[in-house]
Amino acid sequence: MELNIISSMDEDLAAIKKILGGNVDAFELLLRKYSPKVFVMVGHKVPVEDVDVVAQDVFVSAFRSLRTYEARQPFENWLSRIVRRRCCDYWRDNERHNRITVDGMSDRHRQWVDYVVSEMAQDTLERECKKKEAVDIVHLALGHLNAEDKALIESVYFEDVSLKEVAVTFGWSVVGAKVRAHRARKKLRVIVENMVKNG
């Protein structure tokens, strides 16, 4: 497995060297290799009708900032950070999408929200959040967070990205990312509680 990663990094570095040397057509190699992953990642973060535009923006941003890539990490990791930033930019620029109401919830979702708002233990909440109903509710509530908090919660709790990696992505300190994550979780809980009260 590690040999495959090294081989992949060598291929990527060879393509990047060609691009930076003036052979911009070599960028197509990276496009073909990473387009499927980028489209999947973007597809999980933005509405389906905007996936193409955001994915294209990811690759334009990657091309423009290719000189900043450092080979200490796989190119895929570097590209994933750009995906998170561009998706965050999308939500920041499209605040109208953040207006989600309790009307979008099914009866099952409302029951789950009632359960969450009750005084349940944190470990029970974490187990419940793995269920589809819980994830659906959290996604509804995420629409009420600002773009950075939304990206932070999605990255850490849905994509298992480390706080350190999120901090690097957004130019925060690790301590700052931890504080933001704590505050974002509190905001999310308040939003869920308000969804129940207004439902």
Image (cartoon, grey):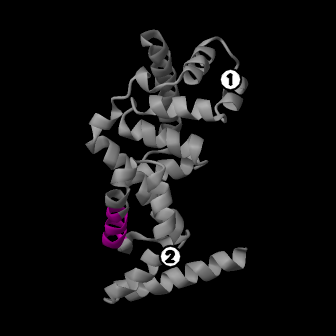
> Could you tell me which secondary element the residue under label 2 belongs to?
helix
Can you say which quadrant of the picture contains the N terminus?
bottom right
Query: What residue range appears in magenta?
Result: 56-65
Q: Is residue 12 left or right of residue 122?
A: left
Q: Tell me which corner region of the image, top left, top right, bottom left or bottom right, holds residue 135.
A: top right
Q: Residue at x 53, y 36 (%)?
A: 178
Q: Is residue 91 magenta?
A: no
Q: Nearer the viewer, residue 90 or 168?
A: 90
56 up-or-down from 143: above or below: below
The kind of residue tagged 1 is Gln
Q: Which mark is residue 35?
A: none
Q: Main secondary structure of the magenta part?
A: helix
Q: Could you tell me which residue is drawn at 67 percent across and 25 percent down?
A: 125
Where is mark 2, residue-wise? Answer: 33
- In the image, is residue 157 above or below residue 31? above
Q: Residue at x 34, y 89 (%)?
A: 21
- Label annotation for residue 122: 1
